[in-house]
Structures are given as C-alpha cells and as structure tokens.
Image (cartoon, rainbow, N blue to C red):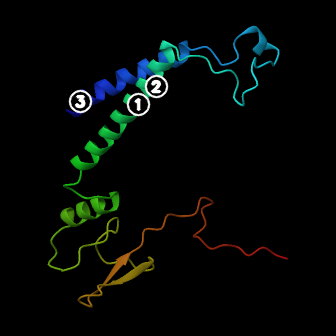
Amino acid sequence: MVIFLTIIHVVVCFFLIVVVLLQSGKAADLAGAFGGMGSQTAFGPRGSATVLSKATTVAAALFMITSLTLAIMSTRGSSGGASTVLETEGSQAVESAPDTGASTPAAPGVPAGEPAEGQPSMTLTDPQTGESQTVPLDIPPAPDGSAGEEEQPEN
C-alpha cells in the first residue's frame, strides 16, 4: 500500500509541476507590461477559472492528501520499536555490551579496562547499586602537538 501511494504521490508531483509551469502570470497582457491592472479591484482583474487553474487546485489537493497519508503510515509503521534515535542507540549499546557480571553496562564509546598511569580517567557511580567504576578517558592531543595545556596570553 505504501509503494502504491508513493508512486501516486510522485506522479501527482510531476503533474503539479507541469501544470504550474504551463500557466501564464496574472499580468501577462499588454497592460500588465506597463503597470496597468485593467481593473480597480484590490488584487487585479479576476477572470474565469481556466482548465489549468482547476487542474492545479485538484493536483495540489491530491498532493496534500498523499503527503499526509504517507506521513501517517510511516509513523504508525515504526511505532513498534524505539521512538527516538537516542533510545535506538541506547538499546544497541546495552545489547552489545559484554557480560562482565556487573549490573551496570559500560557507557557507549568508553573503553573497558583500567586506565594507564598518568592517563586521565573518570569514576562513574551507579545511583541504584552504588558501585563505582573507573574508566579511562580517550582525549586526543591538541592539533599543535601540545598536551592540552593552554598558554595564558601576556597582558
């Protein structure tokens, strides 16, 4: 059903583009070239609706209907899993975490193991169990090759 609606949506899009491009502007006559509107109405002369203007209205309505239908169908189809990107990433990190016997899974992107001597580290504490875990921080070196110390400008 989604594929069928997508095909109809694309066909309506192309039809709408062609119909809009085929229409002439409001002031396309000779009086419009010199700034005259030909009538004293607020928005210019109102002619009878042509076949192209009626086709534009129908195509625009079909475009809106197919757009809304496809959006609703795609939202309902994906409601079975995680609803946000963060929940999807979090569930993958918990599922792929190695079973170390600890009740708290490792944070995503944090390497397991003890930090080396002199390497910066962070202690994480589980608020539910109170267990503490020290993890190394992977801090890349500064682009200029320094160890990250900032020099204070002299005033």
Q: Which mark is residue 61?
A: 1
Disc 3 or disc 2, which is closer to the eye?
Answer: 2
| Quadrant in the picture for residue 131 | bottom left
Number of callouts in the render?
3
**Residue 57 in the figure: left or right of residue 5:** right
Q: Which residue is mark 2?
A: 57
Is 122 placed above or below 6 here? below
Q: CA distance from mark 2 to mark 1?
A: 6 Å
Q: Which residue is mark 3?
A: 3
Could you say where residue 63 lies in the image, as x and y percent from the top left?
A: 39, 30
Q: CA distance from mark 3 to mark 2?
A: 24 Å
Are the residues flagged by discs 2 and 1 in contact, CB closer than 8 Å? yes
Q: Amino acid at mark 2?
A: Thr
Of residue 153 and residue 70, the one placed in the foreground of this image is 70
Dot 3 or dot 1: first in sequence order is: 3
Could you say where residue 129 lies in the image, as x and y percent from the top left?
A: 23, 89
Are the residues flagged by discs 3 and 2 in contact, CB closer than 8 Å? no
Q: CA distance from mark 3 to mark 1?
A: 20 Å
Could you say where residue 55 lies in the image, as x and y percent from the top left?
A: 44, 18
Of residue 57 and residue 137, the one placed in the foreground of this image is 57
**Residue 72 in the figure: left or right of residue 103:** right
Disc 3 or disc 1, which is closer to the eye?
Answer: 1
Could you say where residue 140 lies in the image, as x and y percent from the top left?
A: 49, 64
